[in-house]
Amino acid sequence: MNEARTCLVTGATGYVGGRLAPRLLERGHRVRALARTPSKLSDAPWTNDSRAEVVKGDLSDRDSLLAAFRGVDVVYHLVHSMSNDADFAAEERRSAENVVAAAQACGVSRIVYLGGLHPEGTDLSEHLASRAEVGDILIDSSIETVALQAGTLIGSGSASFELIRHLTERLPAMTTPRWVSNKIQPIAASDALYYLVEAATAEVPESRTWDIGGPDVLEYGDMMQVYAQVAGLRPRTMVVLPFLTPSVASRWVRLVTPIRGKIARPLIESLECDAVCRNRDIDSIIPRPPGGLTPYRRAVAETLSRAERGSEAATWANANADTPAAEPIPTDPDWAGEEVFESTSATVQNGTPDDIWDSLERRGRVIAEKQPEFLRVQVSENSRGNGFVEYALRDLGQKPARTEVTTTCRFFPHGVVGLAYWRLGWPLRKLGVPAVDPFH
């Protein structure tokens, strides 16, 4: 099963689907992206590939799926509601049933699903139970189904990871529910995407679930402590309050992080149980990623690497299959990703780009350069955060020589101290006080 497939991706504007589509194309497959609002993908560069198309469709509308599923070999079902509506589970069930009906009618040969790791024989949160039920509906259909089950995906934009990021960054000390001691087996986003791509063609003995996870099993609290170490923060103090309910905890998360309450609550409820692989049966059908599974610490470091480079977030002008899975892309929610404060200005200076290059280069440690057009230097690195200045130079072709210099300043704060330094120091920076200016 190594030949190219026509793969339909539901949830192509979401976290996983938006990263999966270009990787399927890179692997040689054809991609049909299903979206309720196709215009959200109009600027995505992978949609310009002759093997890619975006079609309008809604999982609640079976007729729209019949049109979209024609000629498809593999359907990736990657949509899961984070709604708190009373009937969300029923909606998820109907969507899964519509996917099965359309796939059967159109001769789809395989469904690939991404669900959540969970223990057997225990009460699950509504959202985890719904994801498990959707997996069962797909597996019980007449269509061959590969139902992958993963825990916390480590990468910018992953809601579960963003919860870890924001809590750790913003709270040097925190009260936590008892689930802070629960066991989690996180997986790097790049590894999860690898398994999803391979699932299109892997030889499988039957329709069933397959657990996927990274090499580490940690307590949730330890995941936050490792994040703090990698991010250069002090160890976090955690006080466990056993009576802290998911409802109260979600309100607390909404108060101290940018994550919306309707997303925070299902995330927190899902942490009420362990999320650990029960077996490594997946190794019998899909070999481990080249280079092996990514350790949690390295996955966090890859996610935070942008703060070490000082680079801009990926835009649709440069986002593609080569964009690291751990880094943000334009379809990620606005609350995702590391906090960065950025400002841009432009000036015109006397001389050619080469004439003024040396003076700019002396401003800090060179991080990236393409002389004489582009230069990025790091101008500050301390407990408050990292400051970078980026210069884009354009010769105006005048005599005497004149050069337009576009300057972009970026500050990546470290934790709550860095946030306070930036926000509270704003009035003094306006007055030119160098002590509160990371770019001085």
Image (cartoon, rainbow, N blue to C red):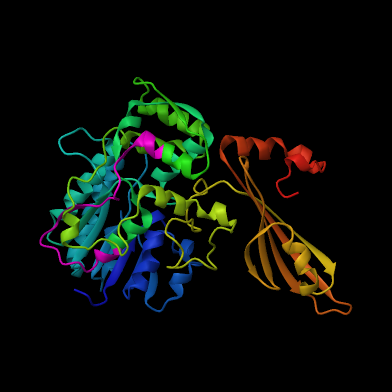
Residue 123: image quadrant is: top left
In the displayed structure image, the side of residue 393 where residue 184 appears, left or right:
left
The residue located at (49%, 65%) in the rendering is: 319
> Front-most of 404 and 270?
404
Comparing 64 with 144, the one in front is 144
Instruction: Provide residue 221's location: percent of width, then percent of height.
Output: 38, 34
Please say whether residue 29 is visible from this viewpoint: yes
Residue 258 in the image: above or below residue 286: above
Specify the farthest residue to the right.
Answer: 400
In the image, the segment drawn in magenta is 197-224
User: What is the x, y in percent for residue 401?
Assistant: 85, 76
Picture quarter containing residue 61? bottom left
Is residue 71 inside the magenta stretch?
Answer: no
**Is residue 199 inside the magenta stretch?**
yes
Taking the spot 40% from the left edge, 79% from the top edge, the residue there is: 50
Q: Is residue 56 visible?
A: no
Quarter in which the N terminus is drawn: bottom left
Q: In the image, 378: left or right of 183?
A: right
Give coordinates of residue 151: x percent, y percent: 30, 46
Q: Nearer the viewer, residue 6 or 406?
A: 406
Image location of residue 12, percent across then percent down: 38, 60
Question: Which residue is drawn at the image coordinates 45% and 44% (left, top)?
Answer: 162
Up/down of 129 relative to 213, above or below: above
